[in-house]
Amino acid sequence: MTENVFLFVPNIVDYLRVITAFVSFYYMPFDPWKASFWYLLSGFLDAIDGHLARLLDQSSKLGALLDQLIDRCATMCLCGALCYFYPDYLMFFQFYMALDITSHWFHLQSTLMKGAGSHKVLDLSANPILRHYYHNRKILFVMCSANELFFCMLYLTHFSAGPALGIGFFSLGLWQIILYLTAPLAAVKTFISCLQLGAACKNIAAIDVADREAARQEAARQKKE
């Protein structure tokens, strides 16, 4: 019997991610608590779809693309809301969105051109930072989670600092504390996006050089014949 890839359990989880993300987008303008709950729930589902794919032997190219695009769209929509709530930092969010989309698009295209089955599969000649980032699931989980928490806490602190917690002589809200703790990791992830873009461009350029050399050799062979 032919398998229905659309009904693979990890892909169904991705469909649920889309639903929960849009519920979050609906609440974003006026209810930060519900918006944050549904947004983080969508992120939690992202953390389990890969485990389910491996556990059930249901990895698929469709699932890899869904995972990639849902991640990007969810973060971009949250950043779009932050552009509204923090207009003075519009250029920062625009830069982040452009870098995030461009770096992941180039990286995905370069892996497909090289014949890799997933954007998370890198050969041993790849940048060592990117190799550890994508091949170590713990690092990947921590970095992605911290990045999402940073933007989510930035959204929440627009409305409230969160429950007050005393730290020495200072008193900070819980959302502020999480924001400050995740900010360095979010910055590192942005740096990794820059590395990812550079590495992908180099890979694609190398493919171009190889293709042009193959074309020249083929032209020379045909000329001799």
Image (cartoon, rainbow, N blue to C red):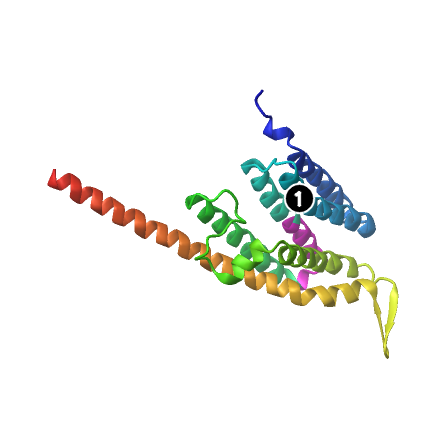
Which residues make up the magenta segment?
75-88
Residue 198 falls left or right of residue 87: left
What percent of the width, then of the height, locates residue 202?
40, 57
What percent of the width, then of the height, locates residue 224?
11, 41
Specify the principal SS of the magenta part: helix
Residue 192 falls left or right of residue 165: left
Would you say residue 64 is visible in this rendering? yes
Q: Residue furthest bottom?
A: 169
* Amino acid type at mark 1: His
Helix, strand or loop status at disc 1: helix
Q: Does the magenta segment cover residue 124?
A: no
Residue that badge 1 annotates: 51
Count neighbours of disc 1 (C-alpha within 10 A) and say few if under 14, some if 14 to 19, many if 20 or more: some
Q: In which quarter of the image is the C terminus?
A: top left
Residue 180 falls left or right of residue 168: left
Is the residue 219 above or below the residue 135 in the image? Answer: above
> Which quarter of the figure has residue 201?
bottom left
